[in-house]
Amino acid sequence: MILGKPKPRRERPAPKRVSRGAWITAKAQAIVKRGPYCETCKTEYATDGHHCLIPFQKRYAEYLDHEINLELACHYDHMTGDLDTYEHRKEFYLRQVARYGKQAVDAWIESLPEKLKISHRLDFMEAK
Ligand SMILES: [Zn+2]
């Protein structure tokens, strides 16, 4: 039996490493500013950071790992899915406006790539 050369293994690009340091910093800053509790139940410690206004997508981590997009949550409330509804996102938007000012919140949203802005309902920005 004649064996040929082994087929070369297909080169795969190394997985892109995404630094999440900004998210850790954002969580720490949010805890200093808002306190250590879950923003939903207000009784459990905030163990999680929820990407509230725009859901997390790894390829956009550098944009989405931001304090304005961060809602402090306990693991239980984070896992229910209740934080993902449009109504909740709108309520969180207004909460962030009260904390950071409408100008800062809207400037962050405006700075996002077009693809993120068109694929998520953001009409609560118009709400009064
Ligand atoms: Zn909670």
Image: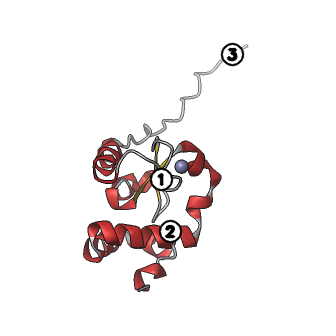
Q: Quadrant of the N terminus?
A: top right
Q: Is residue 32 left or right of residue 5?
A: left
Please give the name of the residue rendered at 52% of the width and 76% of the height, measured from the top-left corner: 121
Can you identify the residue that label 2 sits on?
89
Q: What is the residue that sits farthest to the front in this orientation?
A: 43
Residue 43: image location, x then y, percent: 50, 46
| Furthest-top residue in this view | 1
| Quadrant of res 20 | top left
Q: Nearer the viewer, mark 3 or mark 1?
A: 1
Residue 61 visible in the shown view = yes
Left or right: residue 39 compared with residue 5 = left
Judging by the rendered image, the residue that carries numbered circle 3 is: 2
Estimate the spatial distance between the alpha carbons at disc 1 and disc 2, rounded to whole Å: 11 Å
Residue position marked by numbered label 1 in the rendering: 50
Disc nearest the viewer among 3 and 2: 2
Q: Earlier in the sequence, mark 3 or mark 1?
A: 3
Q: Are marks 3 and 1 in contact (CB under 8 Å)?
A: no
Q: Secondary structure at mark 2?
A: helix
Q: Earlier in the sequence, mark 3 or mark 2?
A: 3
Q: Amino acid at mark 3?
A: Ile
| Circle 1 Cα neighbour tier, 10 Å, few/some/many (<14 / 14–19 / ≥20) | many
Foreground: 85 or 6?
A: 85
